[in-house]
Amino acid sequence: FNYNMQVLLDFERGEGGKVSVMATCKSSLSEVLDPFTCKFAVPGHLELSVAPPSGSSLAGHGGAVTQSLTLSRKLHASGKPLKLRLMVEYRRGGRTVQEVAEFASFPTDL
């Protein structure tokens, strides 16, 4: 993401091999990003469950939007790595901005 946007991922191992993820999106810009959305995707060997976000706009100067996710491997994919793609979309200066990042360096104990 650009230097004005930060996404923090907090992981926790759950029951049955599931992984809970808390995604926190923060902005250092002075203006409010409205609307602000996060979209998540995983490869076919994973299942993803996404809870609603904490808000639909991102306040400036360190404002945050959080969203809870649950990742799990499908039965045939026990040895395959966790991967998560994130797209944030927001309006800034009258135009829509989309940024995409991929996370593949998950802690090994997950």
Image (cartoon, grey):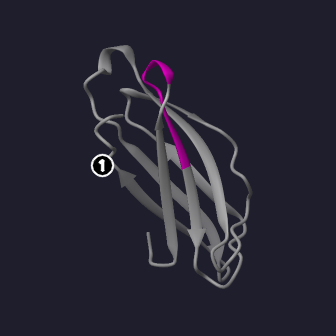
Residue shown at the point (57%, 62%) measured from the top left: 25
Residue shown at the point (48%, 52%) measured from the top left: 9
Q: Residues within 10 Å of mark 1 (few under 14, many from 20)?
A: few
Q: In terms of depth relative to the viewer, which is nearer, 55 or 100?
A: 55
Secondary structure beneath dot 1 equals loop
Where residue 64 appears, as percent x and y from the top left, is 65, 65
Where residue 62 appears, as percent x and y from the top left, is 63, 75
Where residue 59 appears, as percent x and y from the top left, is 71, 73
The quarter of the image holding the C terminus is top left
Tell me, yes or no, whether the highlighted magenta stretch contains residue 19. yes
- Residue 50, placed above or below residue 53: above
Tell me, yes or no, whether the highlighted magenta stretch contains residue 63. no
Residue shown at the point (59%, 54%) measured from the top left: 38
38 with respect to 107 (left or right): right
The quarter of the image holding the N terminus is bottom left
Quarter of image, res 32:
bottom right
Type of amino acid under label 1:
Ser
Q: How many marks?
A: 1
15 with respect to 31 (left or right): left
Q: Residue furthest top?
A: 75
Q: Residue furthest left?
A: 79
Quarter of image, res 33:
bottom right
Where residue 30 appears, as percent x and y from the top left, is 66, 85
The span shown in magenta is 15-22
Residue shown at the point (72%, 52%) measured from the top left: 54
Q: Can you identify the residue that label 1 sits on?
A: 105
